[in-house]
Amino acid sequence: RVLGHFEKPLFLELCKHMVFIHFLEGEYVFRPGNQDDSIYVVQDGKLEVCVQESDGSEMVVKEVLAGDSVHSLLSILDVITGHPTPYKTVSARAATNSTILQLSANAFQDVFQKYPETLVRMVQIIMVRLQRVTFLALHNYLGLTTELFNAESQAIPLLSLASVTSQASTSKVVRRQISVSTEEEHGDRSERASEPLESGSSIAAKSDTDMAYQRARVCLTSEDTPVSPVLSKLSLKKTVTVTEVPSAVYHYASDCPVVPDPGTSRQMDVIFEAAKKDLLTLMKLNDPSFLNNKATLHHVKGGTVIAKQGDQDVSIRFVVSGLLHVYQRKIDREEETCLFITHPGELVGQLAVLTGEPLIFTIKANRDCIFLSISKYNFYEIMRQQPSVVLSVARTVVKRMSSFVRQIDFALDWMALEAGRAVYRQGDKSDCTYIVLNGRLRSVIRLDDGKKQLTGEYGRGDLIGVGSRGYHPLRRRRRRRKR
């Protein structure tokens, strides 16, 4: 399910790190406080995955049978990025005497050293699941928004920028207060800079990186003419009207300016070069030349909508000065909720760039802001030169996720079905809901006279089993994969 794209030599390399462990009924495979650094596959027996409540009691959220696995893809990403963490609220115990296959996530590091391009594909699979599965289920069907994100700042110190703008606001901390209101001060007119595409280089034989290009819908060549990397407020002008009503207003202290005066072109060049150095630090790029002609500096006015929810052609933004607010529409409402704020030293938009999926939120500059932008195409060109950059960027995505998302990640599992196979059958115990990632499913019910009746079809993004899960102890219909 996770390793299916690996070639046989890579899979055999991982097998060298697998060990078998026997557990008696009631024994814990792991519990809060243990290091979260392994994938567990049940060979025989049964496991129960539990979440620890605030009072210390445990609630079973998943039963794991033979052939199924227990793991969090986010935890695997923590390990391969060098930031392993302990289990906080999740535990797994043997419901019966069980034999478990354990694969340490550290094994992936050895494989990626030998096959670095495989790293890109692996991380992309994890990010796609996070966006398409986790957020699809929790936001679209449960209406969750702010519960999915960690609103705390994850910014790195902008040391290079601070050294050249010691008197500017980029070296200060923006103080803010949040007050619930129905009004927001913003300009009706704003300016938005266009983003260039780097001319494509020669394409090698099809590889994991090429497959990642295709998954992310990145064009391998571009005929667009590159423009100057510094795009100031004198660039292209575009009128943007912000009509949505946010759920919160952010007030800035009058003695704490947000954006330094860009001044002359020479001053902007200095800021641009300093910002690129700080971005190199965040992305852990080995060669400063990797950003040459691939990053652009933007200065936008307050009220500018940088990117809209649902946009397909997305860029990575690195905030240099000011703030970028991230909003998401509520289900069945026009009202937007502020998910988090992107501070100087933080990235935004990187999840959609990694996955190729549409942007799941809207990015706005409520006040003047300066940021670096790297288009999706240019980022993948950087990734082709240094595949490990995907780890640094993916790490910033994981840090933005809430602990609640991690709990849900343990409860989710992937199923691959051949055409004609049943997801579940009429009369089966109703204990799961399902989200269709690709392909189509048909819902069939067997009538009293023995005939079968087609009752519905489901495609990508559809949720099935909710009615059965909530109201019926047994399945009333069965669903088959459409041939």
Image: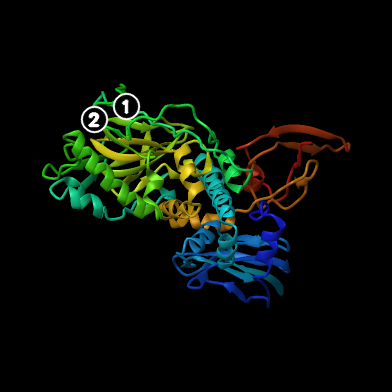
Left or right of 184, for residue 355: right
Dot 1: within a 10 Å radius of its alpha carbon, few (fewer than 14), some, or many (20 or more) residues?
some
* Image quadrant assignment for residue 243: top left
Which x, y percent locates residue 402? 43, 54
SS of the residue under disc 2:
loop
Outermost residue, right direction? 449
Residue nearer the viewer, 50 or 148: 148
Q: Would you say the residues marked 1 and 2 are in contact, meaning their CB atoms lie under 8 Å apart?
A: yes
Residue nearer the viewer, 5 or 132: 5
Outermost residue, left direction? 255
Which x, y percent locates residue 95? 67, 70
Which x, y percent locates residue 460? 63, 36
Residue nearer the viewer, 232 or 128: 232
Disc marking residue 435: none
Left or right of 391, for residue 67: right
Left or right of 268, for residue 107: right
For disc 1, the marked residue is 242
Left or right of 72, for residue 285: left
For disc 2, the marked residue is 186
For the question of whether residue 392 can be seen, the reply is yes
* Image quadrant assignment for residue 364: top left
Amino acid on which disc 1 is placed: Val
Cα separation, mark 1 vs mark 2, equals 8 Å
* Image quadrant assignment for residue 20: bottom right
SS of the residue under disc 1:
loop
Lower sequence index among marks 1 and 2? 2
For the question of whether residue 172 can be seen, the reply is no
